[in-house]
Every structure is written in C-alpha cells, then in structure tokens.
Image (spheres, rainbow, N blue to C red):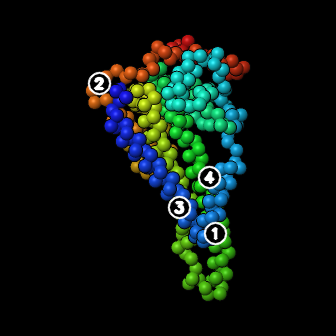
Amino acid sequence: MPWMNDHSRRRHRRRNALHSAVMVAAIAAWMGLVGYSFAGADGVLLAVLGVVAVLVLEPMQSLRLFQYLFGAVRLAPAQAPRLYAIVAELARRAGLERPPAILLIPGPALAAMSTETEGAPVVALSEGMIRAMPARELTAVLAHEISHLRHRDVRLLRLADATGRLTALMSFTGLLLAAFYLPAAALTGETAGAPFAAILLLVLAPPISDLMALALSRTREFAADAGAAELTGDPEGLAKALLRLERLHAAATWEHGRRGRPLRWWRWIRTHPGTEERVRRLAELAPPRRAAPLARLPDTAFSPEIIVRRTAPPWAPPPWLR
C-alpha cells in the first residue's frame, strides 16, 4: 500500500494481535483461577462449560431490540443512496460477505457504532454525528466501524463479557458460602484454617476481570483505527475526526479536571483509549513523504441525501447533505 507506511502498519497489526491474544488468555486464566479457588478442578471445568453454555444458549442481539434500545430508524437504500454506496465500498474492501444495514439514531448525541444482529452486520450513526462530521471524516468513522465488523470484535467482546459474568457469579457464590462458613468456623475454633487468601481473591475477582475486559476493548479500538486507515488509505482523515469529537465532547465531559488535565486513573476504566494516543498511532501509519492516498474516498463522492420520514420529531438534513 504505497499511501501508507507499510512497516508501521505491520508493526501495529502485530502489536494489536499480540495484545488481544494476551488479554484474552489473561481473562480466561483469571476465570480459571477463580473457579479453582471456588471449587478446585471441578470449578475450572464448571467455568469453561458455563462460558460455552452462555455463548451457545444466549441469542445474538436482535435488530428490533437494538432499534428499541437506541431509538434507531433503519434507512432504506433509497433514502440514503450515497451513504449506502460508501458503506458498500468499504464493506467490499473489508471482505465482508454483505454490506451492513444502516441505522439512524435520532438526537444530537455524537454516536457511531456497529454490531452483529442475528448474524447480520449493522452500522448506526446518530443525527448529531452526521451533522458534525465533514464528509471525509465521516467516511473515516464509517471505516472504523466496519473494521470492527471485519475483525469480529463483537464476538470477541461477547466472549470477554460472558467470561466476566461467570467470574462474577463464581465470586458471589463463593463469598456467600464463606459468609456461612466463617461464623461456624469461629464457633468451633477453626478460623486458623480459614481460606482468607481465597476469600480475598473472590473479592477482587470481578473488578480485575472488568479491568482486563476494558483493556481488551481499548486494544480492539486501536486495531479498528488501523483497519480504518487501511480501508480508506487516509489515516489523517480519522485523526481529524477523533480530534473534532474530542473538541465537541470537551465542554460536556467531566473527565477533565478543573485545569483541563485528564484524570490519570480514568484511562483504566475507559472502553476507548485516549484521543492523543490514537492520533499518535495513526500518525505513524502516514507515509514518510506526503503523497495523495490512492484509495481515498473523495469528499464529492460522499454527500448522502438522507430523508427520514417520521411523524415526530421531523428531521431535516444539514445544508451540506441536501
């Protein structure tokens, strides 16, 4: 890919893949350790079977449920032909079997997301996102979401979520049993042999599992950023979109202190990495000398005419989309 720094692209891909593999292994190992503390070897087997059962028996999120949760409206290709054209092109480059459906989320919130509903890919954009983003930057945002679908991130994070829930369940059950065991042990004078280390492990299990799942989520965001740059050949476009979103969010967020400095501990409980780090990594993907991206999707090719017919409230596209 002559429009990207190929060495940096391979390095980013290896780093993201390695970090993801390490985090998945750590989450699974932590669940196994909690299971062993809970019920020995049987607890480990029980934990594994529980995760498999959750993944098999729990149905994928339905499209209707997704629309209900976010108030999203499904756009027909005739309502947004250019938007569907750009999504179809990105999906083709990503190697998806079929282009995702497009949903519009009413309201001024800045939101973009992707998911798999009953095996079908879906990309959702809010009205606020469409209004705020220039064409080039909105294209980069769409590429980021399609990269999530390309990498099967929904299924990977679903696995992490199932593992976390089983870990929390075993922790709660173990602490409940300990609550009955310790008073009885105190009455018989057997508290010296009480498994206080195991109890401490059960107490710490859920928050540590959550922190590892959040770290995995942040790694997948880095991978989606790199994937978006690969699909569009335009790392700078996504970097500009991230900086714009950071500016728009700055006035409404409390994660910045009174002096505007980010709270350091906040980064550990975020699903997304910091904008500064994401922009820095995208800059590494830029070519060593300035060159026009061969596969950049031009601004003129993306001016979707979105007309959503709803009774209330009516929505009119911004001027540049008309």
Give the residue type at disc 1. Asp
Residue mark closest to the camera, 3 vs 1: 1
Q: CA distance from mark 3 to mark 1?
A: 15 Å
Res. 112 in view: no
Give the residue type at disc 4. Ala
Q: Which residue is mark 2?
A: 290
Residue name at image x 62 percent, y 27 percent: 101
Residue mark closest to the camera, 2 vs 1: 1
Q: CA distance from mark 3 to mark 2?
A: 46 Å
Q: Residues within 10 Å of mark 1 (few under 14, many from 20)?
A: few
Above or below — where is 152 with respect to 81?
A: below
Q: Position of residue 251 (x, y in %)?
A: 46, 34
Give the residue type at disc 2. Arg
The residue at the far bottom in this view is 189
> Residue 36's quadrant in the figure?
bottom right
Name the element at disc 4. Answer: helix
Q: Position of residue 244 (x, y in %)?
A: 43, 29
Indicate which disc, 1 or 4, sits on the residue closer to the N terminus: 1
Name the element at disc 1. Answer: helix
Q: Quadrant of the N terminus?
A: top left
Q: Which residue is mark 3?
A: 30
Q: Position of residue 246 (x, y in %)?
A: 44, 34
Q: Which residue is mark 1?
A: 42
Q: Are marks 2 and 4 in contact (CB under 8 Å)?
A: no
Q: Which residue is mark 4?
A: 162
